[in-house]
Image (tube, grey):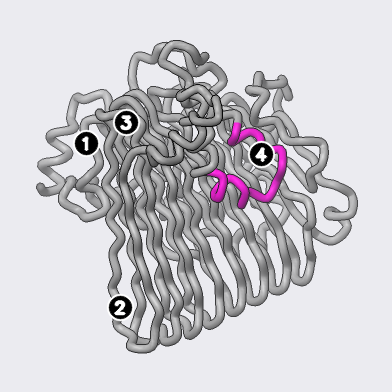
Amino acid sequence: MTQATMDAESAGRPDADLKPDDLRAQVSALSRSNSEPDWLLAFRLASLEQALGMEWWTGQEESWRRTPRERLPRRARVGQVRGPADGSANGTAAIVPSHVFAPDAHAGLVQQYDGRLVASDLEEQAATEGVIIMPLSTAAREHPALIQEWLGAVGPPQDRYDAYGRALWTQGVFVYAPRGVVVNEPLFYLVTQDATAGDHWHYTLVVAERESQLSLIDGGDADDRRVELDETPLLHASVELIAEDGSNLRFASVQRWHRQTAAISTTRARVGRDASVHVTTAAFGADLDKQRIDLDFSQSGGYGEIRGLFVGDGNQHIEHITRQHHQGVGATSDLLIRGVLTDESQAVQYGLIRIEPEGQQTNAHQTMRNLLLDDGAGADPIPMLEIEADDVKCSHAAAVGPVDPDQLFYLQARGIPPSVAERMVVRGFLSEIADGVPDEHMRDVIDELVEIQLEPAGATT
């Protein structure tokens, strides 16, 4: 399908793109409303031109052909902004669901509600050492050299959504650890979605300089998941993780968006020499949730892992598209995704290990496991290997099936009711992923959300 055909097909539909000139004008207005420097506006507009030069997905691409096209809007609209991203307007407090509140023990926090900053904090010791956590627009003004150096440094956008995300973001955060600084407590970026406000675009940039260490937890929720929407809002998150040589960067995302939301996220990590990156995602909301996670090992000796956890119900569709790309010598990567599906929910995991000819002594693995609690649920795990080096260790495994009846029998034989026994098995199945989240409070949140998601239909708010 040509671009002209797709544009004609989209014309007049509520999910059609705005006209290019209208988009350029709105991006410029958005940047001015945040008092952004000229070079950041130039970055936005260049990204917009990249997006306009790309085609929408057709459904024939390997990473898109299992996505239900009718449930994913193809559009680019500047989202509603309630105030400047740095909170310099009225500072009105937002209503934030309690389960994404950060605990008292944290190194720093940024909390946003539809582009408006409602909370910001950084412990004194971390600030003294040069650690930064602040809205991205603010960082562009206060730390221009850092943002110019690192924004978009993971590489060009992967698709049209990704390119639009770089141009249209209405909220975002910059997190930074200078060389040699170890941040022991996690940092938090908390976002609340007003689902009635339309589309949402997020941009997260995390940089760990050489031999530094930091953890960022990204918590997202809708302010009212019960409200009925006239149309499906699009929520897009661009996440860029940069771990310089010898650093240790941990990123965990826990989300429970509105059930009518179509959520797309692109997380890309650049792993330096002997650096390590740990990416954990936990998905509980959205009608359609599609996550792309890429680890790029261009240097030697790095370590990276991807951990995915989800619980689907109703007719949710949940996708993980992952790539472990090895070019450096002696790097290690590991993927583990575990999901639980009830009702008629569906899941897809398409994982690619790509090893270039120079990626000798690579050690790379993939494991995808899905529990089906109802006959109508389904999962399609697809591990793929593309290996052009001859001195590597690679493995992949995938499994789809019901709860082990022997485990249920064992628990029920000890007087545990069947429904409770099933939940115990499910929680044990998911615990390996949840235990990797670098904060006890958020591990409790995940446990709570698993319980909520497994409640019978109509029993949740």
From the image, tell me which residue sits under label 2. Answer: 387
Q: Which residue is mark 3?
A: 345
> Which region is colored magenta?
430-447
Whether 442 is among the magenta residues is yes
> Mark 3: which secondary structure?
loop
Mark 1 residue type: Arg
Q: Which residue is mark 4?
A: 442
Amino acid type indicated by mark 4: Met
Q: Looking at the picture, tell me which residue is in the foreground, 126 or 313.
A: 313
Q: Secondary structure at mark 4?
A: helix
Q: Which mark is residue 69?
A: 1
Residue 188 in the image, given as x and y percentages of width and height? 69, 43
Disc 1 and disc 4: Cα gap in Å?
33 Å
Q: Give the residue type that dot 3 points to.
A: Ser
- Compared across the picture, whether 129 is left or right of 85 comes to right
Horizontal side, residue 214 vs residue 61: left or right: right
